[in-house]
Image (cartoon, rainbow, N blue to C red):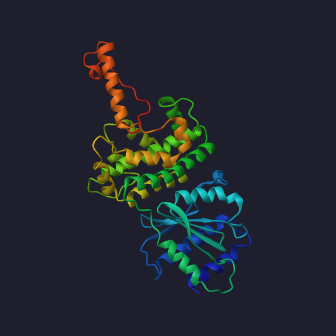
Amino acid sequence: MNIMIELLKQKIAKIKATATERSYYPLLCAFFEEYAKSNALKLRNPQATPEETSTQYEHRIGFPDITIRNGNDLIGWVEVKIPQENLNAEKFQEQFSRYKESLENIIFTNLREWQLWQWEEGEAKKTADTSFDLTDINNASSDEFESFLMKFFEGRAYQTRTPKQLALALAKKTRLLSQQVEEALDKSKEDSDLQKLKETFEKTLIQDISEHQFANMVAETMAYSLFLAALEHSRRDGAELTLTNAIDYLPTNVPILADLYGLVKKVASTIPTIYEATRLLVDQLNASEIERIHQKLVEHKPGEDPVIQFYEPFLKEYDPKEREARGVYYTPKPVVDYIVKSVDWILRNKFNKAKGLAEESVYLLDPATGTGTF
């Protein structure tokens, strides 16, 4: 048996009589880091980080228990349950489904049973499972378990090469961010930064906004901001895109975008689950072939808005019910052209505005700007 696995079993045996779920995190984190550095993998800078959710958020779906990276490169996640729990229990299914849909390389384990779920063509598939009881110190062959670990550590952030692939992957992770915001808002204090941000949205954008709508808007703001930043970032030489430097690449002709990004980033920095979910968006963008995707957007057909290649599939995947309720649909350019020309004609012929839409006294109000096609 692998000596690292044997030592882990011995450590677990010492605490299992009184251990809670969180008691196992330090042992597992240390093991994953050591195993990743071993001859089998030889990763240089593996980091296994336990979730930092405070006790006020316990019993929520939250974020996976352990995140594993090699330096800044994402590897995957581990969701841990105590050995007495059944991984197939109904009470875990909502949580597991949410993680599988949004995260491309995740282990579910109760330290006896191990399931590995990975994305294939953007869809979650169970790619491996094994039985290996870490709570039993009796020697048993660990070959199958080590093969399981190897498959997990070979995982990486999902790579995308087309606007549609990126839109679908980003939508899955944006949905997870929205869920984290909504859960945190439900538990936050009235004077918290998150509640203050909601009040700001109510004063400046939508009165009486629901928690679900607010969470969606926060998540969408981050997703669109980071997507636009990544497109601009790909055209310049520089360091990897991060939550810190993304604001430097946002369009300067839309100042509210930078303002909203700054507000959301401030909230993310104080709530671990929101920060980690936001970081997933950056991971996805850094793992994607942004230059190739940008070129695909540039090479659009005459008369076609290139943003439709990203915007439409993103909205369709992200939250179809909320999209329908809010009437969030992309307006085709020919329809926009017709509406704009019609309004221009009416202004000239019915309101005596010689320059039509170009008159300085005419103002345009587009409260649901979307892609800005109008």
Q: Is residue 186 left or right of residue 349?
A: right
Residue 251: where, in percent of width, then height? 32, 42
Residue 152: where, in percent of width, then height? 51, 72
Residue 189: where, in percent of width, then height? 61, 41
Evaluate whether residue 266 shows in this view: no
Residue 90: where, in percent of width, then height? 71, 59
Which residue: 34% across, 35% down? 334
The image quadrant where one finds the N terminus is bottom right
Which residue: 66% across, 54% down? 58
Vertical position of residue 252 compared to residue 77: above or below: above
| Front-most of residues 158 and 54 | 158
Vertical position of residue 371 compared to residue 166: above or below: above
Evaluate whether residue 35 shows in this view: yes
| Front-most of residues 32 and 231 | 231
Which residue: 57% across, 58% down? 99
Q: Is residue 39 left or right of residue 290?
A: right
Q: Is residue 364 left or right of residue 122?
A: left
The number of numbered badges drawn on the structure is 0
Where is residue 292, by image quadrant? bottom left
Which residue: 41% across, 62% down? 159
Vertical position of residue 8 compared to residue 106: above or below: below
| Front-most of residues 49 and 249 | 249
Where is residue 51, by image quadrant? bottom right
The image quadrant where one finds the C terminus is top left
